[in-house]
Image (cartoon, coloured by chain):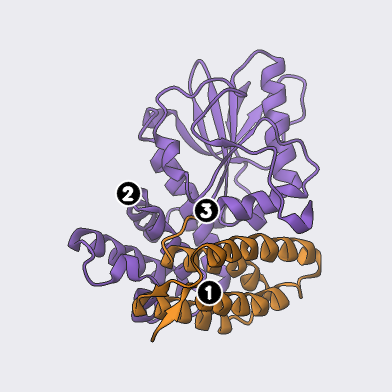
Chain colours: A purple, B orange
Amino acid sequence: MRFQDAAKDARAVVYAGIQADPLVARAAAALVDASPGERLLARAVMNGESNDPETWRAMFPRLFGAGTDANERARSDAILALSLEVAARGEQVRSQFRGAIVESLTGRLLARRVPPASLHRERRILFDGIRAEIHPYDVTVELPERAEAYDCKWGARGIGPDVLLQLEAARGYAEAEGSRLLVVLVVFDARRSCRVRLARQTAPLAGIRLVTLESLDALGRAKTPPATGQEVPAAPVGPPAAPSSAR
Amino acid sequence: MTDTVAAAVDRARSAMVGLRTLGQEVEDEWQYVADLDAAWGERLDAVAAARGAQVLPSSTSAAIERAAAETALISDPHRAIDWLSTFPQIVLFALDEPG
């Protein structure tokens, strides 16, 4: 198993410009220490219609109401302001910003646990005798003894058979050659929505870990994630729970 | 504004009907939207069953009303799908309930 930078095609060059935008870094930096409620606020505002901060403050009284701790209130206000900046970029651009922010946030959380030099972005994973996937992984952790590959999504709807098959295939190829590769789907959305999305997927899920809005902090907590299939900070993807109407 | 948990959940469920209807304009996601609506609806109904008669602080009622009003501003079906996940989370957070 080895890693390679993704090809710099036109799309990659444009997206790299978004990734490098200071707003992405500022938003990710604010979200790295945010509470789950503040991350929900960011999710709502970045995909909302209203641009009046008072509307959002009224919608989140637990973050902005009377009696809220002054420091927490200041942090929530900063996240609100940054989220409104993202929303103001317009529909097409903000969807790219949101994706880049989730990737940057993932990297920052992982940096709490692994050496920064082991963290990479937009990398392909190559296996001997196997045709490489074109789609790069958003974030990778590359250590001599093990590796981790992260695919980041803004919402549960972004989960599809292509990404699941690619993650599971990479995990399987690594296992076949005796390498340790943890494959993880990071989704900036509720676990319930992710499980609804996964319930009707037919792609193999058992080896893929799922990190959701509620469990993002787990990315930075485990000092040494164990091999795939054992208990890890992120919840295993399968078996998913379907709503009763989908069972 | 005086409201109960049951009334707030009713308001939220009404708003979700609008999101579901709009989201299902994306034909490829019709089933996902139906599943999403059912899953979050079940969760909200469970909260109403457990705490329905509880009177809410006015700030909580207002928060849910504002969130419901925000859903009414959405005209893009793709964004409606995203909000069908986000909106119930906002309601549950306002009610101090886990997702």
Question: In terms of depth relative to the viewer, which is nearer, B74 or B67?
Answer: B67
| Residue that lies at the very extreme toward the top in this rendered image | A178
Which dot, 3 or 1, sits closer to the camera? 1
The amino acid marked with disc number 2 is: Asp
> Does residue B45 show up?
yes
Q: Do labels 2 and 3 share a chain?
A: yes
Q: Where is residue A96 in the image (x, y as percent from the top left)?
A: 55, 61
Task: Estimate how packed mark 2 is, as few (under 14), some (14 to 19) or many (20 or more) residues with alpha carbons within 10 Å.
Answer: some
Q: SS for tag 1?
A: helix
**Mark before the other along the chain sequence, 2 or 3:** 2
Question: In terms of depth relative to the viewer, which is nearer, B78 or A25?
Answer: B78
Q: Name the residue that disc number 3 marks.
A: A188
Instruction: Report which quarter residue A237 is drawn in.
Output: top right
Q: In this view, does B32 lie to the left or right of B18?
A: right
Q: Name the residue that disc number 2 marks.
A: A33
Task: Estimate how packed mark 3 is, as few (under 14), some (14 to 19) or many (20 or more) residues with alpha carbons within 10 Å.
Answer: many
Q: In this view, does A139 lie to the left or right of A242?
A: left
Disc 2 to disc 1, how far (Cα)?
Answer: 34 Å
Residue shown at the point (36%, 48%) measured from the top left: A32
The amino acid marked with disc number 3 is: Phe
The amino acid marked with disc number 1 is: Ala
Q: SS for tag 2?
A: loop
Q: Are marks 3 and 1 on the same chain?
A: no
Task: Estimate how packed mark 1 is, as few (under 14), some (14 to 19) or many (20 or more) residues with alpha carbons within 10 Å.
Answer: many
Disc 2 to disc 3, how far (Cα)?
Answer: 15 Å
Mark drawn on residue B6: 1
Residue shown at the point (40%, 67%) measured from the top left: A83
Chain holding disc 1 = B
